[in-house]
Amino acid sequence: MSLEHTWRWFGPQDPVSLDEIKQTGATGIVSALHHIPIGTVWPVDEINKRKNVIESAGFSWSVVESVPVHEDIKRRSGNFKEYIQNYKQTLFNLAHCGIDTVCYNFMPVLDWSRTDLNVTIADGSITTKFEMNVFAAFDIHILKRPHAAKSYSESQIQAAQKIFETMTAEQKEKLTQTVLLGFPGSLEAYSLQQFHKKLAEYENIDTTQLQSNLRYFIGEIAPVAEENNILLGIHPDDPPMSLLGLPRIVGNKENVQYILESYDSVHNGLTFCSGSFGAGYKNDLVDMARSFAGRINFIHLRTCTRSAHGDFMEAHHLNGDVDMPGIMKILVQEQNKRIINKAPNVRMPMRPDHGHLTIPDMHKKGIYPGYSLVGRMRGLAELRGLEMGVRSALDL
């Protein structure tokens, strides 16, 4: 047996087709109903419609990524109780349709942050990166967030000033669109006016309050997941650090420990994303994988180069600063343990997370950064080879 090799597919609008995915070696599809408004119940007929499309192509719908959490729930304000009830009903409906693994995140406002989505590296492929000083230039001088300078050191403020002064109007607009493009599955960004309004909604919510709100949410949905044999996996913050004055609460080992202890059940689990956790300079990914192995319900494998200043750049899957062989060894050993113990969660779905844009895909339109065909196919092939090598070395 191996980890379940899966592939993220954004649905019928995805420029990468299921027929193309079939040739990558993936057997499971990771998908979501992006067309349904956040906070609305996913109807059984819509779930089955997507499931039938996936199964007709020869796959299983392995993981839902994601059932988005409404901002009212994150703030525990407005109609949050109604949205939590809708979330519970969606979990029930997914279980009714035979889908048993759900990924979600609890990041305020943005699902991810980068400062450049078009970085060409030595081999000619295109990747993404995040530079803290560039981000500070956006925050202080373009967004002009009130009191933004308090979030940065004096050296960062000076560097941001120099960067801003040398930027053309076109570069400023490109940076703005990059930062505000925060939702995988969509190529639409916030406007600056919309973004200011969203940030203002979190003015009085600090780390402690957001953690409390997450704990409340888990206390509501985890029992429903448990009753319906749904495995939940919270995704780490990307990047795992506070930005724009927004608290981030799923970024390190202590954060994860708090979350898993809030409801002690395998159904309240973790999406182990080696790329998101890996962007945190102090995070020891092997230690984290070992510590939380029993609660890992979904796996994203990617890597990056990173610095103590908060900068990082996404690398090819077996390069970068993440110890991928060390992580893979722990995952393989954990799956073997689950098999021996006859655990119900032995599939351990894994997908190559992101991939560089390479020549065969450069002509395609509508590809979301990190989600090209060939770049991810290379990643899946490398990861499958690594897994096979680890299994051979461990005689498993």
Image (cartoon, helix red, strand yellow):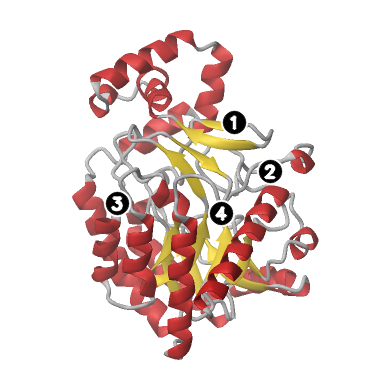
Which of the pair 132/337 is nearer the observer? 337
* Residue picked out by circle 4: 353
Q: Is residue 134 left or right of residue 262?
A: right
Secondary structure category for the residue under label 4: loop
Comes first in the chain, label 1 or label 2:
1
Residue 31 in sight from this viewpoint: no
* Residue picked out by circle 2: 367
Which of the pair 129/201 is nearer the observer? 129
* Residue picked out by circle 3: 249
User: Are the residues at dot 1 and dot 3 in contact (C-beta closer than 8 Å)?
Assistant: no
Gap in Å between the C-alphas at discs 2 and 4? 14 Å
Tell me which amino acid carries mark 2.
Answer: Ile
Q: Is residue 232 left or right of residue 49?
A: left
* Residue under the point 19% across and 51% down: 208
Position above or below: 369 against 267:
above
Position above or below: 276 against 387:
above
User: Are the residues at dot 4 and dot 1 in contact (C-beta closer than 8 Å)?
Assistant: no
Residue 41 in sight from this viewpoint: yes
Comes first in the chain, label 1 or label 3:
1
Comes first in the chain, label 2 or label 4:
4
User: Outermost residue, top direction?
Assistant: 165
* Residue picked out by circle 1: 119
* Residue under the point 29% across and 41% down: 202
Secondary structure category for the residue under label 1: strand
Secondary structure category for the residue under label 2: loop
Say which quarter of the image contains residue 149. Answer: top left
